[in-house]
Image: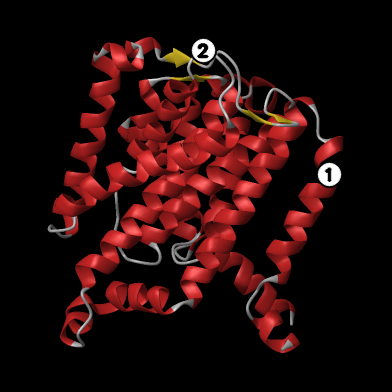
Amino acid sequence: MNTSLRNSGIWLPLAVAVALAACGPWLTGYVGDMVVKVMILAIFALSLELLVGMTGLVSLGHAAYFGVGAYVTVLASGDGAGNLAVLVPLAMLASGLYALAVGVLSLRTRGVYFIMVTLAFAQMAYFIFHDTPVGGGSDGIYLYARPALGPLDMENRLTVFYVVLAALVFTYALLALIRRSRFGAALAGIRANEQRMRAAGFATFWYKLAAFVIAGALAGLAGFLVAARDGVVNPEMLSWHISGEVLLMVILGGIGHLRGAVLGAIVFTLLKELLSTHGVVGGMADHWQLTLGLSIIAFVALLPKGLIGLVQRTAKEAK
């Protein structure tokens, strides 16, 4: 039993979660905000990993579900503090339902056509919030009071930290369970050879649609957390470059690995932060998009299996 648990890779993520929980009260100011931001982006990246790494579906419209979850959080809160126990499921449900509608239509296409259809639906959602009063136009909308549930008040920074950490643990554990389930095995088979899976009697469309909806709902969870943390949402959350960034996180970390998605979110966020800081790179900070792009190209060229591949190779050589 112990060997099985050890082989399953449960100890390292558990140890990291415990360490973060212990460090929470000591992380204040800039560092605390950065850790919370990274954890939210890790949830977002994990949600896309379910599609790209586990199912073989490359989506360029994943930001739509992220943004829908955030907007629903603010709109459903009204003029007072919303109930945390209501807003979280509501944001995930709204994003999941939109993912269901998009998936029913987009999953009938393949390859580049699937990528373009998901992008088109995401841009459609973007312009709905950008060009109509419902989303406050290009300025977005503000949260009057952050969600609360009894003593859990997200106006408190420490509460935000632990709520985000709990959401990250939930997301990682859920995807780890899916990966080890019969459903996860079917998704792996679809990624490897969908035609053979259909010949074996699997209704591959419904498996892909289920994965698409779950991924959308988890992206909505990340959207809720951003809205609750920042107190403001705007249409840029649904734009194509946000979808591109989260896809880069998955690729940078290593496609097909949950730890890779988390690692990719960490490294991408830190790179973006460092390369845009004058105190670190001087005048080059004014051109951080260029240096970030070059850095990503270098990472992908030198590490075709992502950062997780480097970690695994280093661990193997150390034995």
Tag shown at residue 313: none
Percent x, y of residue 288: 50, 27
Looking at the image, residue 287 lies above or below residue 41: above
In the rendered structure, which amino acid carries the disc numbered 1? Cys
Classify 10 Å Cα crowding around label 1: few (below 14), some (14-19), many (20 and above): few
Percent x, y of residue 31: 75, 32
CA gap between label 1 and label 2 equals 34 Å
**Residue with the mark numbered 1:** 23
| Residue at 43% over, 43% down | 92
Classify 10 Å Cα crowding around label 2: few (below 14), some (14-19), many (20 and above): few
Percent x, y of residue 134: 31, 16
In the rendered structure, which amino acid carries the disc numbered 2? Asp
Q: Nearer the viewer, residue 158 or 44?
A: 158
Residue 296 seen from this side: yes
**Residue with the mark numbered 2:** 79
Judged left or right of residue 127, residue 175 is right
* Image quarter in which the C terminus is found: bottom right
* Image quarter in which the N terminus is found: bottom right
| Residue at 64% over, 20% down | 278
| Residue at 26% over, 30% down | 125
Q: Nearer the viewer, residue 290 or 146?
A: 146
**Contact check, label 1 and label 2, Cβ < 8 Å:** no
Which circle, 1 or 2, is nearer the viewer?
Answer: 2
Local SS, label 1: helix
Q: How many marks?
A: 2
> Which mark sits nearer the N-terminus, 1 or 2?
1
Looking at the image, residue 292 lies above or below residue 194: above
